Image (cartoon, rainbow, N blue to C red):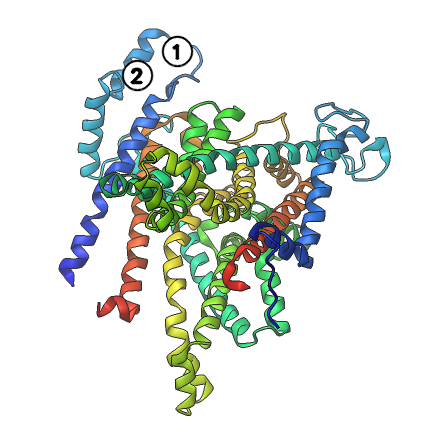
């Protein structure tokens, strides 16, 4: 088992390498450089700057150098945020982004799955219809619309919560961003749970469990629900990608000091090491979460477990 | 009683099923109204999208100055700007969907039909791109090449939307190529390109159509997402994304600046999603 785990984790390295290489190439082949926007930069100064950051060397040498540093966990210096290394910037922002993402994921699971179960148990009744309509609406609302709308209602009109800010992650400041990020995920989870639970409730093994005289609660928790949660588990992979992109918007709407703004600003500024570092970190994170979902799936699904 | 619909082609009976659904009809009506309004609506207003009206800065919706839906901080008419945004968003998303359909169908058909190592390499490439969040690639591409250039935005959007399509088409092609009529074509000496074009492609249309209907709202979402972050359509050009962004900045004093474009965007997305879902139901042979 440990060996299998190690194998799968090491299997991520080539994929990550491809991602890094492609991003490196795209970044460098694009026209323009990091010092284009500096006013009044004389040619010798610019040459010195480029030499200092190793930008004057040949592309393959820069690439080799970058990979060597990366293997040691060094993302290089930021070209635009002076006096900061990319690692420092990411270390500053990542806790914020991770808190936001994890809290949203937990909230989405805690609300979405019970809602899906409730809808499936009351299939084609008013609870089901209401929940379906709500989830369709929540799915259609993009987070850059829900975010400002929630802020408008709960912060500006009702004054219950702050409009924006972080304040070291105080709960009051977390509520709206987490809610914004969790809403579409929770809605999707509810739909997924409802559909697969409905299917499993109609299946022969549930019918036979009922025929054996088991109580409806026992049938639900022990027979119908576990297999119905499999598609939900496999959604966790894509969900992590959603959290990553969603947090870009949510951080921008609520002015949170996360890593999202580094990616956007870094790309605009052509801050090569910063963008690459973000791609590496986020790429590794999504790959890891996908792997985790995969492993969890294998562990839960008897067909895979004993196969 | 068994109803035999011999006289109907699968396409027309699917259209009939689609039409029979109330939700689908309502969504279609709202969508058509929005498209018509986007095409003809701006001509009804005396204002141009980029004209500044100094007498009505941040004007609330009403009849003053013929700014029916109000103006923004610079006195630009919100009704006209929102409709221009709808027009741009629709054009971009339909074009981007078309690009991603063409790439996805081509890629998936070739991979599925060729099989073997080529298939493995091509689909591995798709897997790698899948591992990165979609918008990452678009963000890097658009911001690096030319921020604000619509062509780059279009290519960026179209360049990432094709992955799912490629997977769907590959799966369908794999199933199709084992069928007898393909084998017969091959036996009579028809070339691979000809087989793909004449025999495989027409049989892919069902799933392709469904996915195409579902990808358009996704493209609208992507486009407005990028414009919201300041990486897509740039001021002074109006898109739903940057209008929502502008509105979010002013929502404390002028909530209509947020509410007008947001409502239109949501209506557009809800209708398109609903239509796509219903189309999938109508084309799903298992459901009937």
Residue displayed at 74% across by 35% down: B79
Asked which quadrant contains residue A270, the reply is top left
Furthest-bottom residue in this view: A213
Residue A89 visible in the picture:
no
Q: Who is closer to the viewer here, A32 or B32?
A: B32
Q: Do circles 2 and 1 both sit on a common chain? A: yes
Neighbour class for label 1 at 10 Å: few (<14), some, many (≥20)? few
Furthest-front residue in this view: B188
Per the image, the residue denoted by label 1 is A41
Per the image, the residue denoted by label 2 is A49
Asked which quadrant contains residue B61, the reply is top right
- In the shown orientation, is residue A113 left or right of residue B196? right
Residue A31 visible in the picture:
yes
Q: Position of residue A161 (x, y in %)?
A: 59, 55
Q: Position of residue A7 (x, y in %)?
A: 16, 53
Q: Position of residue B239 (x, y in %)?
A: 62, 33
State if disc 1 and disc 2 touch (CB < 8 Å): yes
Residue displayed at 37% across by 62% down: A233
């Amino acid at each position: 088992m440990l060996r299998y785990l190690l194998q799968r984790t090491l299997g991520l390295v080539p994929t990550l390498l491809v991602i890094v290489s492609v991003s490196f190439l795209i970044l460098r082949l694009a026209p323009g450089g990091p010092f284009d926007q500096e006013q009044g930069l004389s040619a010798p100064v610019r040459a010195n700057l480029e030499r200092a950051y190793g930008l004057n060397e040949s592309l393959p040498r820069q690439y080799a150098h970058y990979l060597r540093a990366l293997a040691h966990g060094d993302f290089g210096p930021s070209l635009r945020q002076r006096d900061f290394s990319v690692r420092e910037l990411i270390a500053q922002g990542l806790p914020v982004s991770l808190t936001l993402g994890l809290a949203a994921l937990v909230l989405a699971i805690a609300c979405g799955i019970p809602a899906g179960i409730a809808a499936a148990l009351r299939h084609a009744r008013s609870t089901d219809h209401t929940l379906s309509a709500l989830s369709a609406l929540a799915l259609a609302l993009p987070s850059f619309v829900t975010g400002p709308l929630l802020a408008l209602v709960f912060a500006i009109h009702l004054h219950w919560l702050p409009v924006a800010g972080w304040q070291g992650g105080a709960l009051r400041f977390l509520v709206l961003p987490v809610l914004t990020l969790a809403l579409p995920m929770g809605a999707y989870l509810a739909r997924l749970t409802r559909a697969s639970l409905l299917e499993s409730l109609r299946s022969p093994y549930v019918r036979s469990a009922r025929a054996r005289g088991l109580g409806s609660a026992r049938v639900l928790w022990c027979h119908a629900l576990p297999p119905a949660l499999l598609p939900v588990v496999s959604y966790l992979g894509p969900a992590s990608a959603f959290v990553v992109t969603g947090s870009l918007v949510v951080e921008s709407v609520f002015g949170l000091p996360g890593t999202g703004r580094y990616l956007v600003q870094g790309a605009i500024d052509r801050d090569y090491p910063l963008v690459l570092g973000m791609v590496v970190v986020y790429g590794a994170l999504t790959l890891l979460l996908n792997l985790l979902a995969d492993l969890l799936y294998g562990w839960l699904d008897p067909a895979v477990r004993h196969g | 009683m068994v109803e035999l619909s011999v006289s109907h082609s699968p396409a027309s009976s699917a259209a009939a099923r689609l039409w029979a659904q109330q939700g689908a009809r309502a969504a279609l009506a709202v969508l058509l109204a929005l498209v018509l309004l986007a095409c003809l609506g701006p001509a009804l207003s005396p204002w141009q999208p980029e004209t500044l009206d100094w007498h009505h800065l941040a004007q609330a919706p009403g009849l003053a100055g013929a700014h029916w839906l109000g103006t923004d901080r610079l006195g630009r008419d919100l009704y006209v700007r929102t409709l221009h945004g709808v027009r741009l968003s629709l054009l971009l998303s339909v074009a981007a969907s078309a690009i991603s359909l063409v790439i996805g169908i081509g890629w998936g058909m070739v991979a599925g039909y060729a099989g073997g190592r080529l298939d493995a390499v091509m689909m591995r490439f798709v897997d790698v791109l899948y591992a990165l969040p979609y918008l990452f690639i678009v963000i890097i591409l658009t911001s690096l090449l030319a921020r604000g250039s619509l062509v780059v935005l279009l290519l960026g959007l179209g360049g990432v939307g094709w992955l799912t399509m490629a997977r769907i088409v590959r799966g369908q092609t794999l199933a199709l190529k084992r069928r007898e009529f393909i084998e017969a074509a091959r036996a009579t000496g028809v070339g691979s390109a000809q087989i793909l074009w004449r025999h495989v492609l027409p049989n892919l249309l069902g799933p392709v159509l469904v996915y195409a209907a579902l990808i358009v709202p996704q493209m609208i979402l992507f486009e407005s997402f990028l414009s919201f972050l300041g990486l897509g359509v740039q001021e002074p050009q109006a898109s739903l994304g940057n209008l929502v962004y502008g509105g979010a900045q002013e929502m404390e004093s002028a909530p209509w600046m947020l509410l007008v474009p947001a409502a239109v965007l949501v209506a557009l997305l809800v209708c398109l999603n609903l239509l796509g879902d219903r189309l999938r139901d109508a084309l799903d042979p298992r459901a009937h």
